[in-house]
Image (tube, helix red, strand yellow):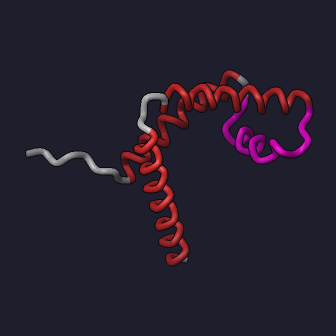
């Protein structure tokens, strides 16, 4: 009997990489590099130029649309559990990194 697939770093990494690839398509439509989006997202509560605000809003709206398409039929309870598991894994990984340095 085959064992069911379990959650592991490979599965998490594949999900992160494929959702990042979807984001990269959206960013390419606005001629925005990922690192520029990170910076724009960080300063989004700071005064932006009109062009910066427009770009920020277009990308934010696009992300909201993508999120809706990707998550629309997933049960809320499953999403809550997944978030809790991923947050716990992140906390544990940070602790491992802190202990390693």
Residue 83 vs residue 47: left or right? left
Residue 27 vs residue 56: left or right? left
Quadrant location of the N terminus?
Answer: top left
Residue drawn at the location 72% of the way across and 31% of the way down = 32
Residue drawn at the location 71% of the way across and 44% of the way down = 38
Between 7 and 73, the residue placed more toward the observer is: 73
Question: Residue 63: x, y in percent?
Answer: 63, 31
Q: Is residue 74 above or below residue 99?
A: above
Question: Residue 79: x, y in percent?
Answer: 45, 43
Residue 56 occupies quadrant: top right
Residue 61 vs residue 68: left or right? right
Q: How many marks?
A: 0
In reply to whether residue 34 is colored magenta, the answer given is yes
Q: Is residue 99 above or below residue 83?
A: below
Farthest residue, direction left: 1
Question: Residue 18: x, y in percent?
Answer: 47, 35
Residue 78 occupies quadrant: top left
Residue drawn at the location 69% of the way across and 27% of the way down = 61
Stretch in magenta: 32-49
Residue drawn at the location 51% of the way across and 35% of the way down = 19
Residue 25 occupies quadrant: top right
Between 76 and 5, the residue placed more toward the observer is: 76
In reply to whether residue 60 is colored magenta, the answer given is no
Farthest residue, direction top: 29
Quadrant location of the C terminus?
Answer: bottom right
Between 77 and 22, the residue placed more toward the observer is: 77
Question: Residue 43: x, y in percent?
Answer: 81, 46
């Amino acid at each position: 009997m085959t064992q069911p697939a379990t959650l592991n770093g490979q599965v998490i990494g594949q999900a992160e990489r494929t959702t990042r690839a979807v984001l990269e398509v959206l960013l390419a439509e606005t001629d925005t590099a990922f690192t520029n989006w990170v910076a724009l997202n960080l300063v989004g509560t700071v005064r932006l130029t009109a062009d910066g605000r427009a770009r920020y809003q277009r990308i934010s709206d696009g992300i909201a649309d993508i999120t809706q398409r990707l998550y629309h039929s997933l049960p809320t309870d499953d999403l809550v559990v997944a978030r809790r598991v991923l947050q716990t894994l992140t906390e544990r990984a940070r602790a491992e990194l802190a202990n390693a340095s």
